[in-house]
Amino acid sequence: MTFRKLLVLAAMTLSIASLPVTAAEKPLEHFFKKPEFAGFQLSPDGTKLAALAPLGEKKRMNIVVIDVESRKANAVTTVDDQDVTGFMWANNERLLFFMDRDGNESFGIYAANIDGRKQRTLIAPPGAQVAAGAMSKIIVASVLDILKDEPKRILITYNKRLAAYPDVFKMDIYSGKMQRVEKNPGDVTGWFVDWEGNVIGAGYVDKDRGSLDGGFKMRDKKSGDWVEITRARFDEASFSPAGIKGDGINGWVTSNLTPEGDIRDKTALYEYNFATQTMGEMVYEHGVIDCCGVITSDKTRDIIGVAYAVGKPETVWLDENWKAVMAGIDQALPDTVNSMSSVDDNETIGVVTAYSAKQPPRYYLYDFQNKTLEFMADSRSWINAEEMADTQPVSFKARDGLELHGYLTLPAGKEAKNLPLVMNPHGGPWARDGWGYNTEHQFLASRGYAVLQVNFRGSTGFGMNHLQSSWKQWGQAMQDDITDAVKWAIEQGVADPDRVCIYGGSYGGYATMAGLTFTPELYKCGINYVGVTDLALLFSTAPDSWSAGMRQMREQVGDPDTEMEFLDQWSPTNHADKIQAPVFMAYGRRDPRVNIKHLTDMEKAMDKYDVEYETMIKKDEGHGYRKQENVYDFYGRMETFLAEHLNP
């Protein structure tokens, strides 16, 4: 199929999908029902495709396998109580997949042949111990490497012995038998392997220094001893491995240090010789954002490109062949961001994932030899991109002059003037918002709301100063950035100052409650989704798997042993008397990160001052809702709540 034929086919598909019904008239299920397909992955030999798809009465996500030549499909799994949350090919006949129990984040490893036979639980997900005021235990097994020279075995990391410091095991994917190959000495937080699956490096923390220092060490090939490559405090300039070439010696690091030892605010990508421990030439840098995600080829075992995002995702292709391939794909699909999300071992066939802020992911097959694309499937075929809202990157300065970047989603077909606004701070908080198709924001925009996101200080990827300016600033400068974002939208004439609501999850839930308590005049309502309400409680109920980073977190947020008054000062539970707007709060009973006590304590505080609020608790969910019926219930309540208080 040629590019020209592809474009004709795509146009026909859009024409068929168009319906004489506006997005505003469509029910919430139109936006939130599970995708038809997600996460296509090619088998190593390129003859099969695996994907997640909703199956059964409860529409749980399960694995289906499609024969590339015949296009016949069959279900590999038929799980009906949980969603399969992820999967990967172990070899050409067997798949690995992962599930926890009702959101407790204790993930197990399962395996099945592509015909659904020989299903086996390799490591069962233990129930997390979640109780009010008690530590929660999260036991996680994860795949470290697929051993291509040993198709019946894989490398896994498993933290059953030491919650924060996993051991490495070699596992038989048919029997589940394990042999430990690396016993964690009690300081390694992550392991690094070469292309042959040899454990050659480790990220570590210095427990004698309260885990405030850490770095990277590598195994000497001759002696077998571990050699420290880099070491620094968590908030000092340093570098970390970004990848290694097939020779097992040369690779790349992302670094705040130049080869001359100078400190730079934004990380750059450098060549690195792991044998001599020397930094080489700079590969890439960006003036606004930390650099970069390294894209490598499994075939050549070398770098082919770098990826980053200031506003929209961008890729710089360093390999000329790949540059030409992706240029052809981008020419054929000019309205989407396109990535080669999966390829077979010999790079003869690939899966192209294409998306935009208005277009949910679409999947194509690319033939490397003939340089042709073939449309394969839509993730959400019922979504018409022409009806969806656009999302634009925006930037502005905070009150102290710090440059902030974010995204503004505006309702389709409406003038961007005096709109009801939903301010949507992200979780983390040491994470960031990105650009792409966002189901929540499309739903809100279809109901007439503008949606604003901001990568407030502390959001990752914007340099050392941006990150470190968030230390001990929960409810303060971090919250000021969110406040300044709302005021910017009002000054631009986009937002109606009398119709602004704040909604966020996790840290975003904290920011919601902080906004309602510390700037009550700004918001007409708030939606707190699995959010922190008491900073000291966050520490006392933290999962034990966080223990390696808890000392750092005390410096980043505040120390409950020595700064309890400070933490109390910035905990919304202690300021319920200031809340003037109605609040909707939704939590999961089995949440191992934000204990349900954050909700119950906030309820008690608000009851004392007769604050108007409503709650939702799902006993079979954790840190966010995944089950289809619970998702519908949550957004149905959200729709009613926003309509009542913002009058869209």
Image (spheres, grey):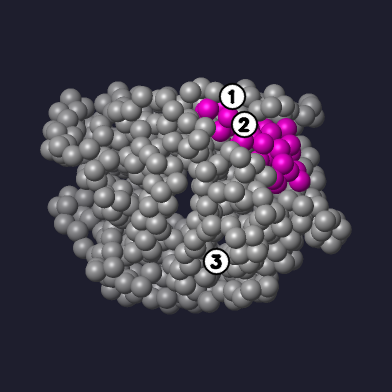
| Residue ranking furthest to the front | 610
Q: Residue sitting at 59 percent across and 44 percent down?
A: 431
Give the quadrant of the N terminus.
top left
Residue 304 seen in the figure? no
Tell which of 295 and 426 is nearer to you.
426
* SS at circle 2: helix
Q: Are marks 3 and 2 in contact (CB under 8 Å)?
A: no
**Dot 2 amino acid type:** Asp
Residue placed most toward the observer, 536 or 125: 536
Residue appearing at x 42%, y 31% in the figure: 419
Numbered badge on residue 28: none
Between circles 3 and 2, the one closer to the viewer is: 2
Q: CA distance from mark 3 to mark 2?
A: 31 Å
In the image, 372 versus 11, the foreground residue is 11
Q: Is residue 483 magenta?
A: yes
Total marks placed = 3
Indicate the position of residue 446 as horizontal and vertical percent values.
32, 40
First in sequence, mark 3 or 2: give its number: 2
Query: For residue 160, what is the image quadrant?
Result: bottom right
Q: Secondary structure at mark 3?
A: loop
| Magenta highlight range | 462-490
**What amino acid type should be assigned to the residue bearing mark 1?**
Phe
Q: Which residue is mark 1?
A: 396
Q: Residues within 10 Å of mark 2 (few under 14, many from 20)?
A: some
What is the CA distance from the residue labelled 1 to the residue labelled 2? 9 Å
Q: Which mark is residue 591?
A: 3
Q: Quarter of the image holding residue 469?
A: top right
Query: Residue 585 location in percent, x, y?
Result: 52, 58
Taking the image as drawn, is residue 73 in sight? yes
